[in-house]
Structures are given as C-alpha cells and as structure tokens.
Amino acid sequence: MSTPSLTKHWHCLDRERTRALQGEKLHRYLRDCVLPFSSHYQRVFAQAGLTADAVRTLDDLAKLPFTTKEDLLPTPDNPRRALDFVLKPDPAVLRRRPATILRALRRGPARAKEELEREWRPTFMTATTGRSTESVAFLYTQHDIAHLGIGSGRIADLGGRTAEDRMLNMFPFAPHLAFWYMFYSGIDRNIFCLSTGGGKVMGTEGNLRAMQKIRPTVITGMPTFLYHVLSEAVNEGLRVEGIKCVLLGGEKVAEGTRRKLAELCAQIGSPDVVVVATYGFTEAKLAWAECPFTPGHTPPGYHLFPDLGIFEVVDPETGRTVPDGTGGELVYTPLEQRGTVVLRYRTGDFIEHGLTYEPCPYCGRRMPRLMGRISRVSDFRALRFQKIKGTIIDFNELEHALDDLRTIGSWQIEMRKVNDDPLDLDEIHLHVTRASDLPEEALRTQISNLLHSHFEIRPNKIVFHTAEEMRILQKVGVALKEQKVVDHRPNGNAAPHQPPPARLQPAKP
C-alpha cells in the first residue's frame, strides 16, 4: 500500500468535516493495514466480535477497548510481547492488491517490491524512557520516518521557520522521540541543524561553544538543561545574538519557566525570543507544538495533525468520551503508522481544557487544538504527613508553582520517610538555588508560606545549593531526563536512596 498524499487543506475544515474525514480514513487504515497484519488487534477484534466495517466514524472508536502501556510489557509467557503490535504484512496478500498490481505494471516488479519493503520493513526504533516501567521499543519503517519529518516540519512551519534559520538541537542523544523529531525537522525543511546530543555527548562547554559558533536562531531541548546552559552563558558573559525561538520538550513548561528562559536569552543578547512548548510521546511517533503567542497571554493550545492521528479526551475514571472543552485523559489512535501500532492508547496524560475546533486566535488555523496544561494523571500522589490521615498532592501544580516563583532558580523535590522508616510519616525536602538577593531565611519563609497557602503543606526542609550542586542533584547532562522530583522513600517506587555527595550536605536545614 503506497503512502497516501496528505490533504493540504485540513486547517480550513470545520469540526464536522474534519471528524467525517478522520472516520473514513480510520476505516481504511483498519481494513487495509492494521487488521490484516497485526496479530494483537486480530485477537482484540475477534474477541469483541468486530470487523473493520464496524468502525466507520469517530463515534465508533468507543467500540474498541483501550490499549495501555501494560499491554505492551513482557510477561513470562510472552517476553517479546511488544512485537505483537508490529504490522507484519503477508507478501501474498500485498501482491494481490490492485494498488500493488498497478504499481508493478507502471514501475516494474523489482521497483514495486522495493517500495513495498520500504513501506513495511522496520529499519529504526525509539523506546519509552522506562522511568516507571520497563522500556518498550517502537519500530519504524521508512514510511514512519518520512512522517517524522512531516510532523516535525509542520512544527517548523507553525513557528515561521525557514531554510534561512539555524537550529541547535540540545535534546539528549538516545533512541527517544525528542532528539530524532528535531533532527528530522531540519532534514524535512532543509534547515541547518547541529544536534549536540545534550550534556552527555558534548557537555555544557561543548554546547556553549556550539551556540557561539553557529549562532542559532532556534534552540531546542529539555527545559531544565536549556536553563542550565543559558545560565552558564550568562555567568560566563557570553553574547549569542539572534535567537528567535526556544522550543521545549520532554517536561512540563510553566509560565515561570518560559519567563526565566526568555530573560536568560535577553541577557546574552537575544531579547525577542518566543518560548514554545511541545507535547509528544513515544507511542504516537509524533509531537505537536503550541502556536507561538505573545508573552503574558493565554497559550493558544497545541495544534494537532488530524490527517495523521485522532485524539480523544475521556474521563479517567469511566473511560467515556467527554464533550469538547472538557478536561480529561488523552487517548490517541494513529492513521498513518506502520511498524509498531497501538490503537486507542491511554496516555496517562490529563489535558486541562480538552479539545477545541475553533480557529486559533493567533494563526487562524481551524485544526483541532489541545487546550490548557497537560499533566500526568499519576502525579497526584498520596503522602502521609499525619498519623490519622494522608494528603493528596497534585505534583503537577506543585511543580508549576515552584517554576513560577521568581526568587528561585532550579529546584528539586525529594520525598523521604522520617528516619528512613517505611512505616513512619512522609517528608518533603525542597532543594533550591537562589535567584534573588533575599536572605535565606526570608526566602525560606516565602517558599514555605506559598506552599502552605496553595497546597496546605510545609516542606520539612528547604536546602539552598549552588548551581553546580543542583546540577549534580538533578543529574543534568547525566540522566536522560533531569530529576526534578525524586522519591527516596524506602520500599517506594524509586531506586533506594543514595545521599548526595558530602559537599552537598547542608550544615543545617
């Protein structure tokens, strides 16, 4: 099956027409790609008594069960379980298809065979980070790699990027989506791009030298790492003029994070920067970006690609689809993937204000958008601070509150147990760097009062660190994702607690 040409006018369509076209494309995708060649979904559809003909509209998606990360994890009986989600076409079936026969007549049998292999044979992979569960590989064919470029190229278009731009990609080099997405955006849009691999490959000094040498107009990376690099540039008195866009991925982006990154760029000679957040996940093989917007205004949401996939917003408890504009858990179904394919994938991510099909107030496009903050459903954590009852804390909001605080720079939340006793009460230790001239005690009081008024908690300890000490705690340039929240409770979900180096231990809390 050849790659269908992408409709160029989806951004002009209203909600009803967009959903109708998605329903038609979903039906064809299930009929021609997924059900004939996915062993997992052949079983799922058979158990539910369904065929591709049962799914012709987006409303029909509700007939299908959800897919979760647990469905992909290995079991003792099936250690290679994720391979059940890989499309494995039968050559005999492909050869009988009219499109294949026509291709062979037009281009010859050898060329037709080569094109089919490029469409269906896996040649590349990314993997989930494996922070909470075992890492899972997702396979790509050349067809999927082309769509990496299409999706990331659309992000470049959305930000007004052209071939005259120069991009510095500081995402960590690894088989993970963010690095390769930015790599292929340069390839697809013919934009010069230097991919440094983040801190592990070139280190902080290498990234700073690259910034000075290529004078990028766009820098991309994890918010925590970019904050670290830009802070070092300020400390060293470097001038890097001409940065127009800071493109972020891999972490939540609070308004305070945007402001701090923009201020750092201004201090090195680039005052007119737009800071843009992206949202993506390995299972989608895609990422989406906000439309660039005026600082201080409400973000216009993440612009989606309705011709490449379908987002649903469901109630996390019931699994039922919620109305447009209503918050809920994001569920994703692709429309173009080969290689590894998951349908109705529950992301575990909560979108604050759901979906909208209204025109974007900034660019005018009518493509559907995800509105509001995106947070992890699992980041509502229960901690027991009192002997009688526990406290539910939304760590998504807690992180935003700390990022928005102007008087602190980088930070880390550490969860502990009193005396490291698994049966004792929970503690929160907050590690911070200062970003103001306030005395430590005044700043400690400010932070404590803020968290008490918003979350009804007070940190058991607030510990101040130098920027270098905080980089060690957060594992900046060492870990794939910098560690802003760590759980060091015995018998918890995290690795056993290992205290920081002796020189990081404070004289007193």
Image: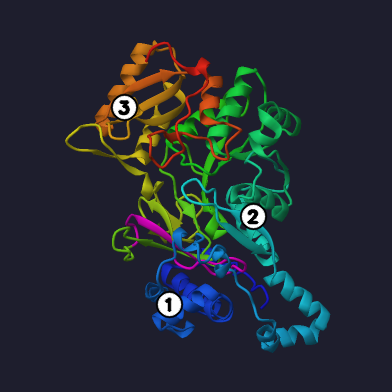
The overriding secondary structure of the stretch rendered in magenta is loop
Residue count near mark 3 (Cα–Cα under 10 Å), binned few <14, some 14–19, many ≥20: some
**Marks 1 and 2, Cα distance to the nearest angstrom?**
29 Å
Q: Residue at x 67, y 83 (%)?
A: 94
Asked whether 342 falls inside the magenta stretch, the response is: yes
Asked whether 321 falls inside the magenta stretch, the response is: no
Q: Position of residue 33 (x, y in %)?
A: 58, 77
**Marks 3 and 1, Cα distance to the nearest angstrom?**
54 Å
SS at mark 2 in the image? helix
Residue placed under numbered mark 1 in the picture: 57
Q: Quadrant of residue 357?
A: bottom left
| Viewport quadrant of the C terminus | top left
SS at mark 3 in the image? helix
Amino acid type indicated by mark 2: Gly
Q: Position of residue 454 (x, y in %)?
A: 27, 32
Q: Earlier in the sequence, mark 1 or mark 2?
A: 1
Q: Quadrant of residue 434?
A: top left
Residue 33 sits above or below residue 485 on the image: below
Q: Which residues are magenta?
A: 324-345
Residue 284 sits above or below residue 291 on the image: below
Q: In the rendered image, is residue 139 in sight?
A: yes
Q: Position of residue 188 (x, y in %)?
A: 70, 55
| Viewport quadrant of the N terminus | bottom right
Residue placed under numbered mark 3 in the picture: 418
Q: Position of residue 244 (x, y in %)?
A: 62, 37
- Viewer-proximal residue, 20 or 174? 174
Residue count near mark 2 (Cα–Cα under 10 Å), binned few <14, some 14–19, many ≥20: many
- Viewer-proximal residue, 208 or 51? 51
Amino acid type indicated by mark 3: Val
Which residue sits furthest front? 76
Residue placed under numbered mark 2 in the picture: 153
SS at mark 1 in the image? loop
